[in-house]
Each structure stands twice: as structure tokens, then as C-alpha cells.
Image: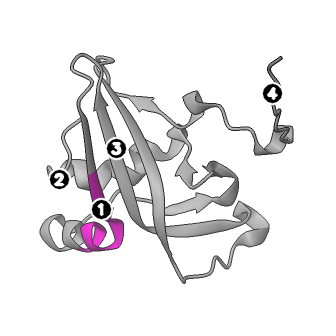
Amino acid sequence: MTSFIIKTMSFEDFVDERSLVSHDALGTKEIKLKLLEVQDDTSDHVWRFGVRVKVKKILVTVKHIRTQQVEEGEFDLQDIEKEMKEKRHYSSTNRWVQTSDIKNGYILNARHASLLADATALDYIVI
């Protein structure tokens, strides 16, 4: 006789993996962003934008679907944003993320493009 231990969790704790993964335009790569560090800045617009954190460092994981090769890289978004402003006098990154867009330490796929905009523009990451 085999016995199984079933661990239950609430629906709020369940995170669908598809909501954490984004894809490139051709569907050849999967991208995940893990939140490593937030900045100590406090949002003074809580009443308007909700509870948010300012992302400082992320871990980018890129999986090549055809070869199953996985690449990882750590990015300091604050430094990249600063470099972008110095070189191009412009930054398109909005590093503020709603706390509801962070699940189990990962950032939901809807925020990936805006967080990686400057890193992509400076060719730190090629998607």
C-alpha cells in the first residue's frame, strides 16, 4: 500500500508558471525575471498607484527553446538607467513595480519589457 502526502495551499499562493514567462517575438526564447534587490525609495503616490517597490537588481534567465540552453545574467537596473541617461540623455525604464506583480520572488511577464528596455537599448541583452 502506497501512501501520499498531499500538501494544500491557498489559491492566492498558487502561481501559474505561464504568468512568469515571456517570449521573444519569434517564440524561440523564454524569459524569466527574478527580483534580487529593491531600492529603499518610498512611493509617495500610494493613493494613486498602489503599493509599489523600485526594482534595483534582477536575475534574467533566458531559455533557448530549440537547444534547451539556459543563460542567466544579473543586472543592476539602477546602474543601467544611469548609464542610459549619460549616453543617450534619456531613459525609458520605469523601475516601479506593483507588489501584486511580484509572485514568489519573480516578476510577472507583463512588466518584463519595461524593466529590460534600457538594457536592450544598450545591447546588454539581445532578445
* Secondary-structure class at tag 4: loop
Q: State the SS at label 1.
A: strand
Is mark 1 in CB contact (under 8 Å) with mark 2? yes
Labels 3 & 1 near each other (Cβ < 8 A): no
Residue 124 tag number: 2
Between marks 3 and 1 in the image, the one whose residue lies nearer the viewer? 3
Which numbered disc, 3 or 1, marks the residue that appears first in the sequence? 3
What residue do we see at 53% from left, 49% from top?
Answer: 107
Majority SS type along the magenta span: helix
Q: For mark 2, does the 10 Å Cα neighbourhood hold few (<14), some (14 to 19), or many (20 or more) residues?
A: few
Q: Amino acid at mark 3?
A: Thr
Residue marked by disc 4: 4
Residue 119 point in image, percent of width and height: 25, 54
Give the distance between the C-alpha atoms of the residues marked 1 and 4, in whole angstroms.
41 Å
- Residue at image coords 54%, 50%: 106
Q: Are the two marked residues, 4 and 3, in contact with CB atoms closer than 8 angstroms?
A: no
**101 or 43: nearer the viewer:** 101
Q: Quadrant of residue 12?
A: top right
